[in-house]
Image (cartoon, helix red, strand yellow):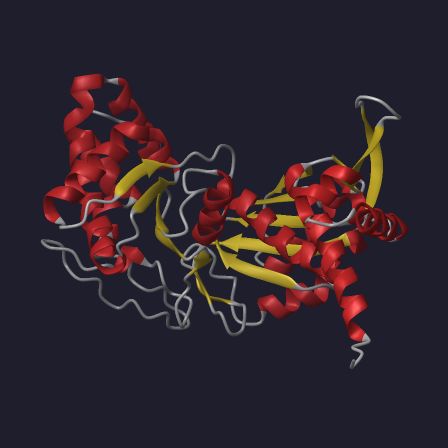
């Protein structure tokens, strides 16, 4: 019989990985439980755990009382075996979260640019302060994922264009990696919000869905088969430029050095911050932000229904256009406006879409609390870090 010397080592790697993934997803387990859930024999499960202990990846965290005989040891992945950083970058602040390999946040820090236009300096400050707060050295970070508004070039990894962050230009991606001395991933912020929604939100059981983000900006994330669809140039989801009936077309959308492109026209002109705020005023609702106006309309009950109906009708133009092309089945509304509107807004969008579209998707509000972009960045960084740890 021909011998294959690589097979035993490969099997050990497969067994080690299976045990680590199980412990991360299911929490502390006994050797017997690991064997039952992975299909490994008791001897193989013991050998696997011994290897992982030697590598400093698992440890005994307690005991499980049973019937006769001694209590069984409970094993868990060592939390400090890997750390990651996720960032949410905006025009006014940068928030950084440091998490352990379990995904538990150990520190979260927000810094402001304070006049610094250099993205590298601002990100460096945020990451260093978060690591210091977590008592984790920068060298221990196994993954860094940064969420930003705008279009991210899938080839270079740079922000190709962001209206809110003009300083994020070509070369920033490489400069950040050089400054932090590790691989850095820049991802569209709405895409990261979709990652968070898919992992533990309204879309956790949906491999196909779209997330419509309505807040300071308007955006769309597309998840197909459990994978983000970014498009050839990274521009998939720039729904704000969608031509809609009765609204002038967007013009001069090209990003030309020294001049910002026009954001007038298209769907964004119907649901922009200014448009929603002005619309709310015509219905008697005022607020410093558009989300406050929407929240006031929801609280007002019947008096606020006309405003919610109008906002839903406007959003439905974009949602219907996406659904007749992709038929995702599920549409999640995210962002400040969607959070303020809740089910009162999402149910109206669903009804409005059904009136103008042969497809009736389920439209639901986001179930994410806190900062979904930041959470998505951490989850994306964890995926990369765990892959590195498992394969090392």
Residue 219 image point, x, y percent: 35, 52
Q: Nearer the viewer, residue 67 or 333?
A: 67
Residue 242: percent from left, percent from top: 23, 59
Residue 335 image position (x, y, % from top left): 39, 40
**Residue 383: image location, x then y, percent:** 62, 54
Residue 161 left/right relative to 93: left
Which quadrant is home to the C terminus? bottom right
Please state which of residues 122 and 27 is positioned toward the viewer in this rendering: 27
308 sits to left or right of 181: left
Question: Quadrant of the image for the N terminus?
Answer: bottom right
Instruction: Confirm whether residue 114 shows in the render.
Output: no
Q: Quadrant of residue 14?
A: bottom right
Name the outermost residue toward the bottom: 2
Q: Residue furthest front?
A: 1
Query: In the shown orientation, is residue 328 left or right of residue 146?
Result: left
Residue beneath the point at 25% across and 36% down: 277
Q: How many numbered discs? A: 0
- In the image, is residue 337 above or below residue 144? above
Placement of 30 over or under 212, stated as above or below: above
Front-most of 148 and 83?
Answer: 83
Residue drawn at x 34%, y 32% as measured from the top left = 291
**Residue under the image location 23 percent in, 60 percent down:** 325
Q: Is residue 263 above or below residue 41?
A: below
Q: Is residue 151 visible?
A: yes
Instruction: Kindly indicate the quadrant of the structure image that contains residue 177.
Output: bottom right
- Give the quarter of the image for residue 301: top left
């Amino acid at each position: 019989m021909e011998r294959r010397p690589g097979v035993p080592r490969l099997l050990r790697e497969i067994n080690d990985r299976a045990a680590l993934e199980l412990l991360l997803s299911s929490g502390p387990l006994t050797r017997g439980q690991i064997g039952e859930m992975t299909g490994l024999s008791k001897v193989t499960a013991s050998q696997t755990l011994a290897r992982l202990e030697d590598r400093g990846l698992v440890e005994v965290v307690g005991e499980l009382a049973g019937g006769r005989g001694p209590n069984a040891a409970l094993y868990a992945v060592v939390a400090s075996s890997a750390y990651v950083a996720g960032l949410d970058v905006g025009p006014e602040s940068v928030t950084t979260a440091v998490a352990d390999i379990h995904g538990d946040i150990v520190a979260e820090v927000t810094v402001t640019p304070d006049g610094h236009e250099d993205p590298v300096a601002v990100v460096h400050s945020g990451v260093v302060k978060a690591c210091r707060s977590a008592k984790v050295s920068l060298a221990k970070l196994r993954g860094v994922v940064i969420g930003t508004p705008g279009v991210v070039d899938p080839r270079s990894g740079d922000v190709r264009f962001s209206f809110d962050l003009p300083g994020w230009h070509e070369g920033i991606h490489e400069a950040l990696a050089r400054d932090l001395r590790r691989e850095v991933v820049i991802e569209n912020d709405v895409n990261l919000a979709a990652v968070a929604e898919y992992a533990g939100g309204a879309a956790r059981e949906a491999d196909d869905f779209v997330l419509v983000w309505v807040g300071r900006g308007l955006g769309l994330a597309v998840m197909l088969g459990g994978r983000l669809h970014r498009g050839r140039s990274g521009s998939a989801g720039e729904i704000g430029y969608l031509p809609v009936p009765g609204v002038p077309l967007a013009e001069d959308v090209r990003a030309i050095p020294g001049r910002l492109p026009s954001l007038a026209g298209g769907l964004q002109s119907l649901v922009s911050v200014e448009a929603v705020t002005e619309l709310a005023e015509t219905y008697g609702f005022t607020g410093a932000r558009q989300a406050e106006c929407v929240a006031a309309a929801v609280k007002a009950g019947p008096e606020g229904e006309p405003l919610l109906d109008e906002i839903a009708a406007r959003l439905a133009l974009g949602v219907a256009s996406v659904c007749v092309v992709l038929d995702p089945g599920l549409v999640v509304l995210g962002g400040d406006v969607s959070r303020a509107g809740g089910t009162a807004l999402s149910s109206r969008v669903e009804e409005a879409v059904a009136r103008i579209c042969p497809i009736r998707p389920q439209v639901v509000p986001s179930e994410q609390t806190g900062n979904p972009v930041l959470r998505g960045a951490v989850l994306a960084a964890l995926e990369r870090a765990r892959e590195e740890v498992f394969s090392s």
